[in-house]
Amino acid sequence: MIRDDIVDLREQLAAQGVHTLLAQFTDLHGVAKGKLLPLAQLRTLVETGAGFSGPSIAGTGLPRMGPRSEYYGRGDLATACALPWMPGHARIVCDGFVAGEPFDACPRQVLRRQIARLAERGWSLQTGIEPEFFLLRRTAHGFAPADEHDRLAKPSYDLKSLPRQADFLHELVTALAACGLEVLQVDHEDAQGQYEVNFLHADALTSADRLTLFKLAAHALAERRGMVFSMMPKPFADQPGSGMHFHVSLDGGDDETLRHFMAGVLAHSAGLAALAAPTVNSYKRLVVGESLSGTSWAPACIAHGPNNRTALIRTLPGRFEWRLPDASANPYLATAGLIAAGLDGVARRSDPGPACTDDLFERPIAARLPQSLAEAVDALEADETLCNALGATLAREFIAAKRAEWIAYARHVSAWELQRYGDRF
């Protein structure tokens, strides 16, 4: 039957003017990778996969020689869609295979394993991922908002600056809609040059695939206009950073199950921080303190509360909003960690504790999240549940990569240090 499906899809894509396939996967960091294949190679892409040098991909840990040095990306037919911003091209998301078997360190395969654990219980996870991002321009001194007139101290929902990017945003929304994403709303966020696009929720795997598609579209369309699309968590020290909040619901589970699930997410928050806030810069977002707009909008305390945007988990009827992830997170790994932590809470019948109705930005009374990447990586390494979910290879590669990132940052001599200490002593 799958061969008939391949023939049908090839004919459908050809009728849309597609001549080239973009075989796409993500590396350890959630960065889209891939190659181009003629449409005629669709069957090979689905049945065998497009071949890549394994050690050339961040996070595989594959050798430079032998049968396990080859990484094959096998296309998932259900993800095929023509790309409006690349006429004649269609993206197909790939799962990683090595030596003919699902590759344990492929981020999409990691998420598939956790989804299978839910399916064993008759459950599925629905996620609505809300990416925040900046539109920037390069200057002699670094980056600045692409809209040089976007200067308000509190720019949320600003209807002067938002229309100035209306053409880009409309082109982005139109392109995403053509790819099957239902965009719910677009707004200007609480930092200069910052925006948010909300999509309709979907099953966890589809949501991660769509988030990657969104990034591909936004990068390409911004670049054509001379702008930089940035999902750096906090590009400006005095302004709020970019989160990537997950709205989470558990199909097949009752309210009590969701409560245990939420308790597991809270209990594993320190280790989850490494997956959901995976850069040095992430921890300049996850702090208690004010910004130019008056608030950071980023959780620093491990707590849950009804419609409480200052808590790590904001509870809502039938779902919760996980506010830890930032815009640099690999959506496959963050979601896989979320599921593993939640299922541990269900297995233990954990209780999340009393709901917090305090403003935790004013009174940070709950336990704190890690305040550096180094602290978060240590917590991840000590978290057997999360490391088992990632698998031995990916856990090892992720921890090593993030430790190296922290060491490089710690050894870097910044302009702040030179200004403060250069002639002080």
Image: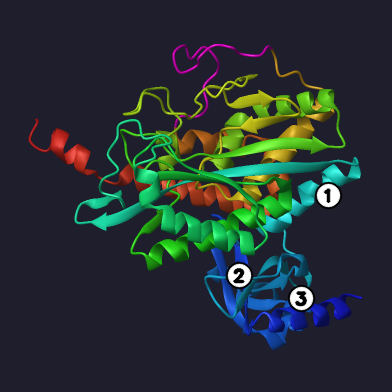
| Relative image position of residue 334 (x, y in whole percent) | 63, 44
Residue 117, picture quadrant: top right
Q: Amino acid at mark 2?
A: Pro
Q: CA distance from mark 3 to mark 2?
A: 24 Å
Residue 335 percent location from the top left of the image: 67, 44
Mark 2: give few (<14), some (14-19) or many (20+) Cα within 10 Å: some
Q: Nearer the viewer, mark 3 or mark 2?
A: 3
The residue identified by callout 3 is: 46
Q: Nearer the viewer, residue 402 or 199?
A: 199
Within 10 angstroms of label 3, few (less than 14), some, or many (20 or more) residues? many
Q: Earlier in the sequence, mark 1 or mark 2?
A: 2
Q: What secondary structure is marked by label 1?
A: helix
- Of the two numbered discs 1 and 3 on the same chain, state the one appearing first in sequence: 3
Residue 116's disc is 1
- Span highlighted in magenta in the image: 354-371
Q: Name the residue type under label 3.
A: Val
